[in-house]
Every structure is written in C-alpha cells, then in structure tokens.
Image: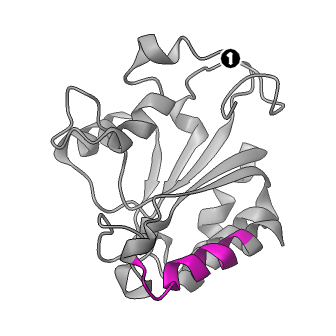
Amino acid sequence: MLFGGRNRGWTVSTPPRVVWFDSHGDLNTPETTESGFMDGMAVSMLTGRCWRTILAKIPDFHPIPDEALLMLGIRDLDSPEIDVIERSNISVLSPERVRGDIVGVASLAKSMDRVYVHLDLDVLDPTEGRANALAAPNGLHADELYGLLQALRAQVEIAAIALTAYDPRCDPQGKVANVARKAVEAVVG
C-alpha cells in the first residue's frame, strides 16, 4: 500500500505528504484529457479529483488534500490542468522558480514532517538525457535535482521514493539511468 493506511505510519488524520517531481502536471481527468493517457491523471486520482469509485475500493486509500502536495519542475501543462492549479491549493513550481533558491524551495516541505517523493525522470531537461518520449524542454539539470533532493532530505524524513517514467530505449547512452542512481544516493545519503 502506497498511500494512507497503517502500513506506512500515516493515518486518515495525518495523510501522506507528497513531493512530486515531474515535467507534467498529471492533473487531467477522463473528462479533461486531450490524449486519453492514464498517466496524466495520477495527481487527480491522488487528490480525489477523478476515478473516485475505483479508488474507494482500495483498502485504506484516502485522497490527500491539496496542501499536502508540492509539485516541482512542472512545465508542460494542458489548459485544463492550468485551470485546476489556479483553483487549487497545490504548490506548483516550475524549473525557473526552483533555480537559484533550492534550499528555499526544499524548506517549503519542512512543515510536511514525512514525505513520499515521486520522481518522474522526465523532470530533467532533455540535454541531460531523455528519460522517455514525453520529455519536455527547459527542465531541471541533474545538479539541481541532486541539490533539491539533498536539501529536502535535510528538511524532512523521506519515507519512500519512486522513480518513474524511464524508457531505456530513449536513453541509449544510459545518461538518465546514471542520474537516477545518483538521485537515489542523494535521498538515502
């Protein structure tokens, strides 16, 4: 079980806190998606904006409040996702906002206590290597990602991390795989 429940020490009264690294907002729903891509609905599911009937069948799953989510590196958004962000209490920071204040950005998570880190490797700028076919330009550089993860680790307990959206066919030289390894080392020390 990833979210909620007794297995991770989180309860309904203390939902998990999430730091979401991604180039995409993942805030689409079946009604708003332009592509039909299910991965583009992950944050909407996490926050209870869609697929409620199916999610209700997952034991101990409870949507997290917007305030429990910090999204970093987001830059490739559909128009409906922008609308959701503007109406929500989700903290969303583009790579430009993150640059130059890595410690300050990480300190936003200080009140979160324990966090789950979702690291979609397409948060990286494609000049660092392509994590997948959906990688968008103007992303974080590897050193910025490492700095954010280290500063985050200094502020809060990272209870779990997931590396996602890696397609080795898009990374024939293994550049992103190397960044992923170093990112995990930055989290575990």
Residue situated in front as seen by the camera: 22 or 147: 22
On the image, the x and y values in percent for residue 44 come to: 40, 33
In percent of the image, x 77 and y 45: which residue is there?
A: 114
What residue lies at 76% left-to-right and 74% top-to-bottom? 185
Q: Is residue 156 above or below residue 55?
A: below
Tag 1: residue type?
Asp
Residue at 57%, 29% in the rendered image: 64
Residue 15 on the magenta segment: no
Magenta segment boundaries in residue numbering? 171-184
Q: Horizontal and vertical percent for residue 20?
A: 53, 52
Kindly report the secondary structure that dominates the magenta region of the rendered protein.
helix
Is residue 174 toward the left or the right of residue 78 in the image?
right
Query: Could you tell me residue 118's position as x and y percent?
Result: 58, 52
The C terminus lies in which quarter of the figure? bottom right
* Quadrant in which the N terminus is drawn: top right
What is the crowding at mark 1: few (fewer than 14 residues within 10 Å), some, or many (at least 20)?
Answer: some
Disc 1 marks which residue?
60
Query: With 47 as the anchor, is 84 left or right in this view?
Result: left
Q: Is residue 183 magenta?
A: yes
Element assignment for label 1 = loop
Q: Is 59 drawn above or below residue 132 in the view shown?
A: above
Q: Which residue is at the front of the view, 167 or 78?
A: 167
Q: Using residue 28 as the reference point, say whether residue 72 is left or right of it.
A: right
- Tally the numbered discs: 1
Q: Please tell me in which quadrant of the rendered image residue 15 appears.
A: top right
In the image, 100: left or right of 8?
A: left
Q: Is residue 22 above or below residue 30?
A: below
